[in-house]
Image (tube, coloured by chain):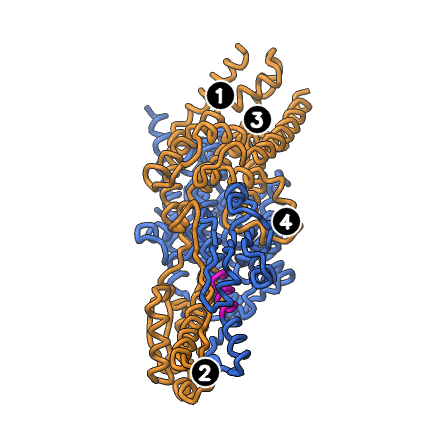
Chain colours: A blue, B orange
Amino acid sequence: MKALPLAFIGPVMRKEFRQIRRDARSLVFMIFIPAFLLVMFGFALNFDVKHIPLAVVDQDGSRTSRGLVDKFGTTEYFDIKAVLDRTGEIDGLMARERIRAALVIPPTFSEDLLAGRSPSVQFIIDGANAMSGTTAAGYAAAILQSYSQRVTLEALDRRGLGGAVRPFRADVRVWYNPELRSARFLLPGLMAFILMVILTTSTAFSIVREKERGTMEQINVSPLPPAALIIGKLVPYALISLASAHLVLALGWVLFGVAVKGSYLLLLLMMVLFLVSGLGQGILISSITRTQQVAFLISVLTTILPTFILSGFVFPVRNMPAVIQLVTYFVPARYFLVALRAIILKGVGLAAFWDQALFLAAFAVLTLALSVAMLRRGGRDRRTRRAR
Amino acid sequence: MKAILSILKKEFLHLRRDPRLFPVIFISPILQLVLLGYAANLDVKNIPSVICDMDRSAAGRALIDDFVNSGYFSIEARVERMDEIDRFLDHGDAVMAFVIPRGFGDRRAAGREASVMIIADGSESQSATIGVNYATMIAARAAQSIVLESFERVRGLGVRPVLVGSEVRVWYNPELKSRNFMVPGVLGLILMIMTTVLASLGVVRERETGTMEQLIVTPIRPYQLIVGKLLPFVVIGLVDATFVITVARGWFGVPIRGSVPLLYALCLAFMLNTLGIGLFISTISRTQQQAMLTSLFFIMPQILLSGFVFPIENMPKFFQVVTHVIPIRYFFIIIRGIMLKGAGWPELWDKTAALLVLGTVILTLSVARFQKKLD
């Protein structure tokens, strides 16, 4: 290819801008959907496992057993939703997801405690939701442990042996997010997730629409080089999404107090790389499909679930099997997420994530180069077909 | 009936015209399920950690061994000074750090309370919370066993420590595999995404290409047109559901404890909603691009507010109320109920009723809008 004829990019950009402006709703959506979703999810979601709905079957019915039930009820981890008479009732409630866990105190509980025997309670967990199940079991164990400790210490006190000292305590410090605030956890992930979906879908139609309407033929016979077409189509969307990304950042700061700790310029660099990657993926989809319907399906299928699950937003990448980890290299949100957390929450410099920047740049270049190649091939095919 | 059949034929012809559509519709759900079935794993093990033992006492080493042997943490490095931890956490090479401060062993020997420092990277959402929970539990357990040992020595005093044990029973998913939870969820999501997306373009495409006018002048009634347009997507949805269920059962070994016919029947009830939403989007959009962006606006909140990953009971009250109009919320309880819990009609009738009511409302609404557009 000869030197990129820059003169061609301007007119394509102008045409694209005009087209975007004509469809006011799409423009508004591209700019404001990410912000709207971020605000909504930022308020609605958190990773805490608290208020697990619990049913209690107290077969003992003594003051002691009620004390243990109170210990469960007064923590924020469990909400006692039902007090049942028979264990048989648990099944129905759990199948309907009215409760996630059940505590069964056996009839001999207080008797055993008084006699100095160690009694045992039954704790039933709805394992269908593995994550909240595991956590619920952990909370229950912790509550029972502190309960036992108190009972033991009281017994010591009664014999005048009080003042026993704990051997050591755990002093927990959480860095970068001391109060373990969910908004700080969530915001970088939500930004990457929402932006990725909107980015890819906003360019997914850019080329296929021309094909479906037949205007691609005109472009093919014009002297416009494919690279100029792609860049001309990319730039307007890149500007729009840059505005949208800044809106998201600003809202994260104003509403959720998540300020950018590190360098803004670095953030801008990573943002531009990410935006071009997302838009590039959309353009690539657009250049390999023939109808808008298929382009839409592919872009939704390759962004929503993969970004949600393979980016490290919710599920840590290092827990995945090696083959799946390999797949995550094709999810640009993965790199952006690492960089966002590093810049926004940790405030560290490029040294901590330069590799992410390289991968992201490679992804962007790769998608755009592939799109150019696809377009060039498509144009040639059509020209030769006509020649015949 | 004949009118519906001819619309059906026309729609299938349309679907066949793009040879790339069928692979996307039928292969991608399986691909997604396999990828996500392996990736969606919250069983946090081997959390990368750094150990900083500044005390080098036997007591400190014993505690460190408790952390290391628990299997939850994988030790990336052992460092000498606190400030060396920074680099590991800053670069994301470690998520947690355990620090035994100087004097730990001496304080313990003197019978005074010592402390161990547990540091977690708070920007790593899940791992940090889970890791901190594990670590404090391990520390508490270690502390307790030391107390118990000292009791052993004073057994003569007649005090015995009491330990309330718990007998934990995990129902439905005894090994607590997250996969068994996620895979049915993916079925719901794929069904929703596929059918909403396809239906959302259904009508707007005719309008964009100008063929809507032609359909209006034919003697076809609006309801026939809608039935003919939506039926192919119902078929596609059911085929996708079959694929996903087969892979979930055959490949991932997710059990199906309840009735399969009931599962299919409720898939239909769910599709009433997704197709209704899709059709609604189609009637309020002028171009396919608008329809696409509008459907994202409907799909993304459904995914995140459905209880798929983020439990509904942890949302603020307002959003908990909002989730009641999200059809997939009910469908998730239904598929998990049927597949994992062996639930049947007695447990699921109210969820089904909710799906039917929501579905009827949205479908009626979009048909009404559609009729107005035709005039």
Q: Over which residues does the magenta segment extend?
A: A139-148
Residue at x 39%, y 82% (from the top left corner): B81
Q: Nearer the viewer, residue A55 or B69?
A: A55
Residue A184 in sight here: yes
User: SS at mark 4?
Assistant: helix
Q: Nearer the viewer, residue A66 or A387?
A: A66
Answer with left or right where residue B167 lies relative to residue B319. Answer: left
- In the rendered structure, which amino acid carries the disc numbered 1? Glu
User: SS at mark 3?
Assistant: helix
Frontmost of labels 4 and 3 is 4
Q: Earlier in the sequence, mark 2 or mark 3?
A: 2
Do badges 3 and 1 share one subunit?
A: yes
Q: Earlier in the sequence, mark 1 or mark 2?
A: 1
Q: Residues within 10 Å of mark 4 (few under 14, many from 20)?
A: some
Furthest-left residue in view? A322
Frontmost of labels 2 and 4 is 2
- In the rendered structure, which amino acid carries the disc numbered 2? Ala
Cα separation, mark 1 vs mark 2, equals 74 Å
Q: Is residue A157 magenta?
A: no
Residue at x 47%, y 40% (from the top left corner): B336
- In the rendered structure, which amino acid carries the disc numbered 3? Val
Frontmost of labels 1 and 2 is 2
- Identify the disc placed on residue B203: 3
- Identify the disc placed on residue B114: 2
Frontmost of labels 4 and 1 is 4
Cα separation, mark 2 vs mark 3, equals 71 Å
Do badges 2 and 4 share one subunit?
A: yes
Residue, disc 4? B319
The answer for which chain carries disc 1 is B
User: SS at mark 1?
Assistant: helix
